[in-house]
């Protein structure tokens, strides 16, 4: 007999991780799976970062680190915020956590009481919704469409705010769509936040270094809402360090202190060796980041060109990150043999079975008529993956 808490029962399994697990299981059975499901750079962590980690082991960084992170790492992050983003966060306003996901749940649990409303702009990253549920909050979904480049317009946002609204989840460049809000679009959102006292906004900027159009803009740089913005970032995507699990926030001091208190009871300070590696990444410049970005841009153009040749797919060219989210509604209701495609999850499973290509259905992202495809893999595999997808889709009728 299982006695799971209602809290755990209320949570969904992460569909990105679930699809990745299915892919690994099939690969272990010798099946040739091309995985386009995980948001993980296919590059290795740069050598100077790995060397810093090795040195940290030799230097005996093996004791409990401070709960909010080592002082020198938080000072380096403070400098990074000032130089790269135009944001003044003192080291005391910075908390280092076990990845961006950990940073996000820290903030949500620090701010949200049961019954508080949290606006989530859809399509959204899979964990936003369930993290709000975990905190006892009420997710309020504001939907954007592919026709509007998956961006929510200000009138939609304004109409969704009530006296119970405490927080907005904002992400640019976006996972899962790759879209990027421009300055004017962000300013309109900032002005809406400014009008509502007690309303806060998380700006998830984990993909800031992977942007192909213009310059990254941090939401907290709009000074009139600086004290209402929690900036979330990390080293996973920009430095190919997903497994090192280092994320961080810059926030108003009272929020940072709340997260520090919470983290002290959950995890304490995160891995000492990973923190030393993160310090080397942040202080080491962006040369590797630029090389990765150039590769992602080439792959984006390759993949979008190939997808545009597939009957029934509608594609918007992303401006950042390493995802594209084609509309696949043309195929909903179609079938192959006994397989019926009723939703995007059905199509993702069909492609895994018939094409041996792993994608993720859009339902998990609040985009039921779409698929998320990651192009964080080689050019050759992208070409082969689309060939397989096209062949499998042609079987549906």
Image (spheres, rainbow, N blue to C red):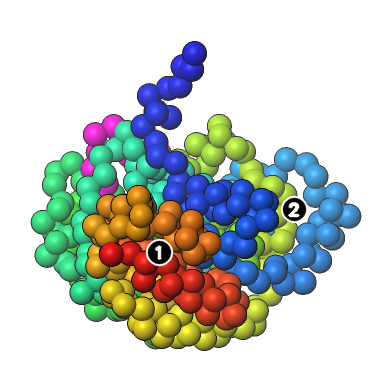
Residue 25 shows which numbered tag? none
236 inside magenta stretch: no
Q: Residue at x 60, y 52 (%)?
A: 26
Task: Specify start and end residues of the magenta stretch as a single range.
Answer: 109-121
110 inside magenta stretch: yes
Element marked by disc 1: strand
> Would residue 223 appear left or right of 299 to someone viewing this image?
left
Expressed as whole percent of the image width and height from the top left, the position of residue 103 reads 49, 50
Q: Residue at x 31, y 52 (%)?
A: 340
Q: Quadrant of the C terminus?
A: bottom left
Expressed as whole percent of the image width and height from the top left, the position of residue 242 reads 61, 59
Please, which residue is most extreme toward the front here? 337
**Badge 2, how many Cα within 10 Å: few under 14, some, many 20+?**
many
Q: Is residue 86 visible?
A: no
The residue identified by callout 1 is 372
Element marked by disc 2: helix
The residue identified by callout 2 is 273
**Badge 1, how many Cα within 10 Å: few under 14, some, many 20+?**
many
């Amino acid at each position: 007999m299982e006695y799971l808490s209602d809290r755990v029962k209320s949570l969904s399994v992460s569909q990105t991780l679930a699809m990745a697990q299915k892919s690994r299981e099939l690969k272990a059975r010798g099946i040739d799976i091309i995985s386009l499901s995980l948001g993980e750079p296919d590059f290795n962590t740069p050598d100077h970062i790995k060397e810093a980690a090795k040195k940290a082991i030799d230097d005996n960084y093996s004791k409990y680190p401070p709960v909010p992170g080592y002082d020198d790492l938080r000072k380096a992050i403070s400098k990074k915020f000032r130089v790269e983003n135009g944001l003044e966060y003192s080291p005391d306003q910075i908390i280092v956590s076990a990845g961006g996901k950990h940073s996000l749940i820290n903030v949500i649990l620090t701010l949200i009481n049961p019954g508080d409303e949290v606006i989530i702009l859809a399509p959204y990253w899979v964990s936003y919704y369930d993290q709000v549920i975990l905190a006892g909050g009420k997710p309020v979904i504001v939907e954007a469409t592919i026709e509007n480049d998956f961006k929510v317009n200000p009138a939609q946002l304004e109409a969704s705010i009530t006296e119970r609204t405490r927080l907005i989840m904002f992400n640019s460049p976006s996972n899962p769509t790759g879209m990027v809000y421009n300055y004017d679009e962000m300013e309109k959102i900032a002005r809406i936040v400014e009008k509502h006292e007690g309303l806060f906004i998380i700006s998830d900027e984990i993909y800031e270094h992977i942007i192909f159009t213009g310059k990254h803009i941090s939401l907290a740089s709009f000074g009139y809402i600086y004290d209402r913005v929690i900036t979330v970032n990390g080293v996973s995507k920009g430095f190919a360090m997903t497994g090192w699990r280092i994320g961080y926030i810059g926030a108003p001091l009272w929020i940072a202190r709340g997260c520090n208190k919470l983290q002290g009871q959950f995890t304490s300070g995160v891995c000492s060796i990973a923190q030393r590696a993160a310090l080397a990444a942040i202080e080491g410049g962006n040369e590797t980041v630029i090389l990765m970005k150039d590769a992602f841009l080439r792959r984006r153009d390759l993949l979008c060109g190939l997808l545009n040749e597939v009957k029934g797919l509608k594609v918007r060219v992303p401006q950042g990150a390493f995802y594209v989210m084609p509309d696949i509604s043309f195929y909903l209701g179609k079938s192959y043999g006994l397989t019926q495609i009723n939703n995007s999850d059905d199509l993702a499973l069909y492609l895994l079975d018939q094409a041996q290509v792993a994608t993720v259905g859009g339902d998990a992202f609040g985009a039921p008529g779409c698929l998320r495809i990651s192009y964080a893999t080689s050019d050759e595999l992208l070409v082969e993956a689309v060939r397989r997808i096209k062949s499998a889709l042609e079987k549906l009728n």
